[in-house]
Image (cartoon, rainbow, N blue to C red):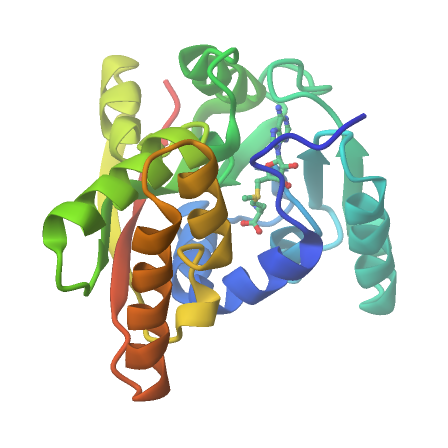
Amino acid sequence: MSKPAAYVSADYLRKAAELTKTLKLRTYELMDIKPGAQLLDAGCGPGIDTIALAKLIDNAGHVYGIDIDIDKDMLTEANVLAENENLQDRITHQFAEILKLPFDTDQMDACRAERLFQVLPFSIDKEQVVDELLRVVKPAGRIVLADTDWATASVDFENSNFERKLMNFFSETMRPNGYAGRQFFRMLKQRALNNIEIEIFPMMVTDYEQTPFGDWLCSEAIEKGIATRVEMMNWKETLVKYNDKDEFYCTVNMVLVSGENI
Ligand SMILES: C[S@@+](CC[C@H](N)C(=O)[O-])C[C@H]1O[C@@H](n2cnc3c(N)ncnc32)[C@H](O)[C@@H]1O
C-alpha cells in the first residue's frame, strides 16, 4: 500500500513524543485507569503510548493498539518494544481501520486517540470516527482525544502576512485535517457526554530543525505555487539565521478534550 502524504515515520513519532510528554501523561490520567482496565489507543503508531499504558494496568487489564496497515514495521517495532519491556502479555497491537474497530460494543473502559484526527483524510467522516470510538467504550467509560490546532501555529518572521499565508497553507493543504484539535469540544458536546474537560498544551520549539516548516514546507509551497523559490529561500535563510543565533521561535497549541460516555 502506498504511503499517504500525511504519513510520518516511527522515528519522527519518537522525537515528537519528547515534545508531547506532558500531554501524553495527562491523557493517561484522564483515562482514569482502574484494576482490570481494558484500554484502546487508536492510531497507536510505534507503541509509545500502549507500552506506557501497559505499565499502568495490572495483569487483569489489557491494552489494545490499532493502526492502519501502511507501515508494517511500525507495529512490528511496537511488538519488539513490548517484548523488550516484558509487557507482551498485556498488549495487543493490530492493524485495523479506524471506522471498523475489531472490538465488541462496550468492550473498553477507556480509549485515547492522539494526533490521529489530523492525519485522517477528507474522505473519512470524523463524526463517524468519534461514534465508532464511543461504540467500543462502556457507558461511563472515558474517551480522550488530543490533537493539534494548526490554526495556532506561529513562527517569528518579519513579514507576518507571508508567515500567515504559509501557516494557512500548511494547516489546510499539508495536513489532511489541520484544525482537528479545535473540533473535539463541539463533537463531544453534541453527543452529550458527561464531565467534558478541555485543556490546552502550548508546544514551543526553538530549534528550527524540529519544526515541519523547513525543507518540507519550502518544497511544497513552491510546488503548489503558494510562494516563489526566492521567497522560500528568504524564509529558510532568515529562520536558519535566527536558529544559528538561538533566536528561532515557534509555537502551536495541542488541544486535549475528554469526556465520559453515556
Ligand atoms: C501522527 S501519528 C500519531 C501516532 C501516535 N498516536 C503518537 O501520538 O505517537 C497518527 C497515526 O494514526 C495512524 N492512522 C492514520 N489513519 C488511520 C486510520 N484510518 N485508521 C487507523 N490508524 C490510522 C497513522 O498510521 C499513524 O500511526
In the rendered image, the quadrant that contains the N terminus is top right
Horizontal side, residue 166 vs residue 83: left or right: left
Q: Residue furthest front?
A: 230
- In front: 163, or 176? 163
Residue sitting at x 30%, y 86%? 246
Horizontal side, residue 110 vs residue 245: left or right: right
| Rendering coords of residue 195 (x, y %) | 25, 34
Figure label count: 0
Q: Residue furthest bottom?
A: 245
102 is higher (above) or lower (below) than 14: above
Residue sitting at x 53%, y 24%? 137
Task: Answer with the quadrant where ligand 1 appears in the image.
Answer: top right
71 is higher (above) or lower (below) than 27: above
| Rendering coords of residue 36 (x, y %) | 65, 44
**Residue 142 at least partly seen:** no
Residue sitting at x 19%, y 65%? 156
132 is higher (above) or lower (below) than 251: above
**Rendering quarter of residue 164:** top left
Residue sitting at x 13%, y 64%? 158
- In front: 41, or 35? 41
**Residue 35 at least partly seen:** yes
| Rendering coords of residue 233 (x, y %) | 37, 60
In the rendered image, the quadrant that contains the C terminus is top left
| Rendering coords of residue 252 (x, y %) | 28, 54
**Rendering quarter of residue 175:** top left
Horizontal side, residue 1 vs residue 7: left or right: right
- In front: 230, or 242? 230
